[in-house]
Image (cartoon, rainbow, N blue to C red):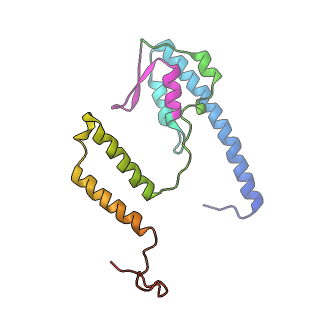
């Protein structure tokens, strides 16, 4: 792989990505509306499934799936991981043409990994499950208690107990 070495070539590459991305989004829109129309006319989901399978890595496949589900005569089979024809549904091609597939299932905002928040969220969900009769039996109380102990220890350690309490000026790391 040859890397770009100047600011100008990097900026040109970025602009090419922007332009190509917009063209790709439009191509997918036309293809999606076309397969929805084909499905409506022939009751055939083959082209819908082929389009979804053809989506490049890194693309928002779930947005396309939601778009097709909203406007096409299809259902999504979670087990088979493919669309099936739904004769009871209706096709809404005019609406499909009016809204871009990219408007469906917006990408979630990036959130950096935060172990403390993750553990707090797990504890919160476990507490909620304990209050729900249907889910309470799924909570291992012993495991939950151990998790609380670990979380409390991790939270207390985060206060900065990396150094011994005996001589804070010595900055001696505490060993386990």
- Residue 151 pos. (x, y %): 36, 60
- Residue 14 pos. (x, y %): 70, 51
Residue located at (22% from left, 40% from top): 137
Location of residue 27 (image quadrant): top right
Residue located at (65% from left, 62% from top): 3
Farthest-out residue, bottom: 170
Range of the magenta residues?
63-86
In the displayed structure image, the side of residue 112 where residue 134 appears, left or right: left
In the foreground, 114 or 69: 114
In the displayed structure image, the side of residue 103 where residue 168 appears, left or right: left
In the foreground, 159 or 94: 159
- Residue 169 pos. (x, y %): 49, 86
- Residue 89 pos. (x, y %): 45, 14
Farthest-out residue, right: 8
Q: Is residue 28 above or below residue 175?
A: above
Q: In this view, does 164 lie above or below 29?
A: below
Location of residue 79 (image quadrant): top left
In the displayed structure image, the side of residue 67 where residue 147 appears, left or right: left
Q: Is residue 130 above or below residue 29?
A: below
In the displayed structure image, the side of residue 3 where residue 127 appears, left or right: left
Farthest-out residue, front: 166
Residue located at (37% from left, 47% from top): 124
Residue located at (48% from left, 26% from top): 48
**Which image quarter is the N terminus in?**
bottom right
Residue 66 is a magenta residue: yes
């Amino acid at each position: 792989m040859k890397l770009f070495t100047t600011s100008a070539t990097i900026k040109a590459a970025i602009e090419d990505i922007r332009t190509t991305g917009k063209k790709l989004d439009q191509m997918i829109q036309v293809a999606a509306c076309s397969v929805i129309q084909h499905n409506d006319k022939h009751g055939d989901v083959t082209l819908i499934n082929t389009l979804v399978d053809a989506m490049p890595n890194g693309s928002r496949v779930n947005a396309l799936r939601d778009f097709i589900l909203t406007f096409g005569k299809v259902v999504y089979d979670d087990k088979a991981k493919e669309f099936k024809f739904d004769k009871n549904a209706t096709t809404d091609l005019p609406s499909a043409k009016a809204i871009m597939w990219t408007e469906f299932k917006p990408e979630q905002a990036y959130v950096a990994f935060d172990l403390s928040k993750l553990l707090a969220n797990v504890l919160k969900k476990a507490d909620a499950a304990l209050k729900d009769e249907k889910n309470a039996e799924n909570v291992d109380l012993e495991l939950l208690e151990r998790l609380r102990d670990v979380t409390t220890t991790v939270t207390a350690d985060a206060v900065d107990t990396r150094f011994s309490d005996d001589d804070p000026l010595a900055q001696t790391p505490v060993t386990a």
